[in-house]
Image (cartoon, grey):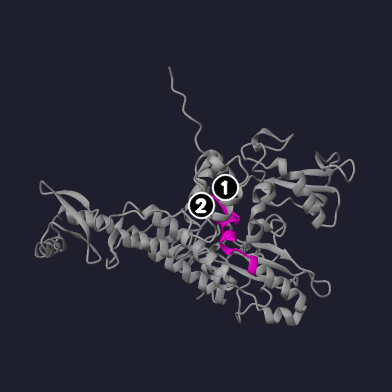
Amino acid sequence: MAHHLADPIPSRLLMWQRVREYAVPPSMIETATARRAVGDWAGACAAARIDVDLDLRAVRDRHGTELVTRLRADLRRLAPDLLRWHMPRIAPDGRLRPGLTLSLARYRGSGATTPHLVVRTPPARADGGQRMSLALWEGTGHHAPAHHPHPHPQPHPHPHPDRRFRLDLHRHLWDAGRSGELARRCGAGGTPSTAPPDLPAHLHDFPWAVECWAAEAELLLRAEARPRGAFTVRLGPRNHAVLELVGPDDSHAPTLRRLREVLPPQEVAALPVLPEASARVLPDLQLLRAGLVAAGRLHPLVAAALTASGPVAAAGPAPTAAGSEPTAAVPVPGPGPGDPHRVECRGEIHRIALRDGVLTAVDHDPAELRREDLLVALGGPALPCLRAIDAAHRDPAALPGVRERLGHGDVAGALAVVEGLLGPGAVLRDGPLRDELESAVARRIDHGLFRSGLAAVHPGTEAGTGTSAGAGATGGGHASGAEQGKTGHRPRLDRRTPPVIRRKRSSRARPRTGLTS
């Protein structure tokens, strides 16, 4: 009889499992929480790798004391590590969605302006370190953030707040004082739905929070000064569901139904969009229900809110308090001084362990090791112990964990893993491990150039693939619309042409040279 295999875990959940393990390390949560507890909101943002592009004095001079008071109160309630935890991410690596401006709060400003407290992510070409920035967007139409402290800021590809990704209606995703609302807003106590009603079957592969749509749509329409009416839910790149919020009277709960008439595309685009945080099931809730993560390994504020709701309380151990160190610490792999590697060498079992901060073959005499190193330099075979040490330096078993940490900007965590493997006094040799560390440094430099306004973007470097000629380029097709508009013509070769474009253009064989040997 054939064995029936269990359903494979969706790649989406595996991505979120890696994100929850590496993207917001426990050290960041602990430091940001401690600084926020003493009122140091700027220090908490620095611990969460969020740059502050705000000048409160300039805001006061422009909008008055009342707005600054509200803004400062929101900054003190902001939990930047919780904000990073809930930020939108992209597959397959789970990195922050690039080139995004996301509204956290709206204020009533002077005149016709409506200032927004926004968080921004850099474009894909400058996402090294996975840093974000806080700014005040005034709806002025300028590309530079309002009150930017830098003299020559780099224009952001999408300076306007995104209608699809907005957290001003979901303060529980970044406000530490309202994080307890998470279970109620994400539908943790209800029955999970797999798809909205009356939708095609091919759209049923993603869990939708349908049971929350009516309440969330009421909040959305109320914020748009519409007590009832139509709105849209984005189901895919070219698929939107147009729904209508109706209710028998003000004393009854509103309900949803499909819009009866077919609207033209222009009117559909003008309708309010249900934010992604309302449309989809919370990833943490999916992970808990699938048994892919324990509650104690979630963010303390998230775990406290979800376990208090009841249905997911048995999914893992109880979370720690918000002010203490969480139990989500990822163990650092690699040998310790008391737990050496064991290698078969010359018919014997030899030990490899850390000695004086360096990974060393313990059972070989130092003079013998120097002779063997000289023999290897002359082309001779290396001892099995030396081959094991060389493999640990070039391509260790923990390289995937180091790569994940570097990809999410956790340089300190990656270096801790490397030091646990090789020792703090090790000198890295050429190989994949060194390449990953050097690439991370190059990406950080690209981000610094972008922040300072010194990054020159050539028109041919982001033609639809989101890649750049710099060392820190990343793929994924996330070039901004403004940059894609510049790629309709063939760029000329000049001194500003990146080397990769110059080599590509100059290496094309011409007919007369193609006949030569």
Element carrying mark 1: helix
Rate crowding at label 2 as few (under 14), some (14 to 19) or many (20 or more) other CA atoms within 10 Å. many
Magenta span: 76-96
- The amino acid marked with disc number 1 is Asp
Q: Is residue 45 left or right of residue 223?
A: left
Residue under the point 69% across and 62% down: 103
- Residue 36: image quadrant is bottom right
Mark toward the start of the polypeptide (1 vs 2): 2
**Residue 84 against residue 253 in the figure, above or below:** below
Which residue has dot 1 on it? 284
Q: Closest to the observer: 258 or 342?
A: 342
Is disc 1 in contact with disc 2, using a CB cutoff of under 8 Å?
yes
Q: Is residue 440 left or right of residue 182?
A: left
**Residue 424 against residue 68 in the figure, above or below:** above
**Residue 153 against residue 298 in the figure, above or below:** below
The answer to if 245 sits in the magenta stretch is no
Kindly identify which numbered label has been placed on residue 251: none
Q: Quadrant of the N terminus?
A: top left
Rate crowding at label 1 as few (under 14), some (14 to 19) or many (20 or more) other CA atoms within 10 Å. many
- The amino acid marked with disc number 2 is Arg
Residue 132 on image: x %, y %: 57, 66
Kindly identify which numbered label has been placed on residue 20: 2
